[in-house]
Amino acid sequence: MGRGRQKAKHTKVARELKYFSPDTNYGALEKELATKNDSGDEYVDKWADDFDDEYDTEHDQNKSA
């Protein structure tokens, strides 16, 4: 019996999400996109030091065996 009310609520929420447009800070976006990488190499993985190289060592051992 409550399906109509539930569907109406979901429709209302979906409509609010569809037409919601948050304020965009274009100045911050421009600064983020305009920053240059000082290292000069575009392909340096800045997160490489945060993770172990387990996959690389296991992969190399299996390859040589």
Image (cartoon, grey):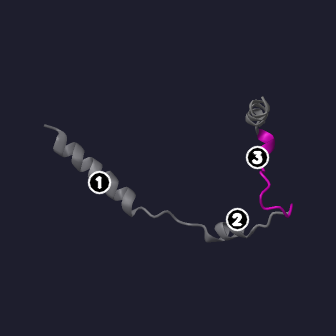
Would you say the magenta stretch is mainly helix, strand or loop? loop
Image-quadrant location for residue 27: bottom right
> Quick one: label 2 or label 1, which is nearer the N terminus?
1
Q: Residue at x 17, y 38 (%)?
A: 2
Disc 3 residue type?
Trp
Query: In the rendered image, which quarter contains the N terminus?
Result: top left
Q: Which residues are magenta?
A: 39-50
Mark 2 or 1, which is nearer the eye?
2
Percent position of residue 30, x then y: 67, 71
Mark 1 lies on residue: 12
Q: Is residue 53 above or below residue 26?
A: above
Disc 1 versus disc 3: distance between alpha carbons? 41 Å
Percent position of residue 29, x then y: 65, 67
Mark 2 or 3, which is nearer the eye?
3
User: Mark 3, residues whose alpha carbon is within 10 Å: few (<14), some, or many (≥20)?
Assistant: few
Q: Is residue 37 above or below residue 4?
A: below
- The label shown at residue 47 is 3
